[in-house]
Image (cartoon, helix red, strand yellow):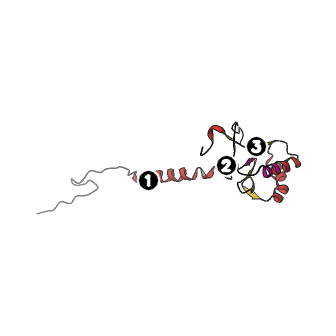
């Protein structure tokens, strides 16, 4: 008695050839990348996280400009770089000239004493920087309230 061999390639009455692409792994990788991007996208928005005060304010129309941030501890950040008040005095004019920015945005945390923000604005005025804008959160979009 002779035994028949079944071939996966479809010869001699074997199983038919199926040319299908298994996309399960591709879908797994795609969903993994999607989750990674969803988690990292808010982090990549940049800037120092502060709770700016709410006020009747219009959204900023331009993305150009130097952003000076004062966090809840009173630390000053010049475009995401932490600086002391002395370093701020020395470097703010250079940064603005290098970026050729027409405007400076001051973003102060709501809990920072008014005097700290006023000192920063005063230093900008001493440096003859006229276009200074204060960043506020529109009243209808306030976080946590």
| Residue at figure coordinates x 82%, y 41% from the top left | 131
Residue mark closest to the camera, 1 vs 2: 2
Question: Residue 89, labelled with which disc?
Answer: none
| Mark nearer the N terminus (1 vs 2) | 1
Distance CA(mark 2)–CA(mark 3):
13 Å
- Residue picked out by circle 1: 28
Image position, residue 130 (x, y; %):
85, 42
Residue extending farthest to the left is 1
> 28 left or right of 9?
right
Residue 122 within the segment the image draws in magenta: no
Image position, residue 36 (x, y; %):
53, 53
- Residue picked out by circle 3: 134
Q: What element carries label 2?
A: loop
Tell me, yes or no, whether the two marked residues, 1 and 2, touch with CB atoms within 8 Å.
Answer: no
| Mark nearer the N terminus (3 vs 1) | 1
- Residue picked out by circle 2: 51
Residue mark closest to the camera, 3 vs 1: 3
Q: Give the range drawn in magenta.
A: 100-118
Picture quarter with the N terminus: bottom left
| Mark nearer the N terminus (2 vs 3) | 2
Tell me, yes or no, whether the two marked residues, 3 and 1, touch with CB atoms within 8 Å.
Answer: no
| Residue at figure coordinates x 26%, y 50% from the top left | 16
Mark 1 Cα shell of 10 Å, populated few (<14), some (14-19), many (≥20):
few
Q: Is mark 3 on a helix, strand or loop?
A: strand
């Amino acid at each position: 008695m002779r035994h028949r061999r079944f071939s996966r390639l479809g010869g001699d009455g074997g199983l038919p050839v199926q040319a299908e692409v298994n996309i399960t792994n591709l879908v797994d990788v795609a969903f993994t990348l999607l989750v990674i991007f969803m988690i990292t996208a808010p982090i990549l928005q940049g800037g120092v996280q502060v709770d700016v005060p709410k006020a009747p304010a219009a959204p900023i129309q331009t993305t150009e400009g130097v952003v000076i941030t004062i966090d809840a501890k009173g630390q000053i950040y010049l475009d995401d770089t932490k600086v002391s008040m002395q370093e701020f005095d020395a470097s703010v004019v250079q940064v603005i000239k290098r970026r050729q920015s027409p405007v400076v945005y001051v973003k102060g945390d709501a809990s920072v004493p008014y005097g700290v923000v006023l000192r920063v604005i005063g230093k900008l005025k001493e440096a003859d920087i006229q276009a200074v804008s204060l960043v506020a959160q529109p009243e209808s979009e306030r976080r946590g309230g």
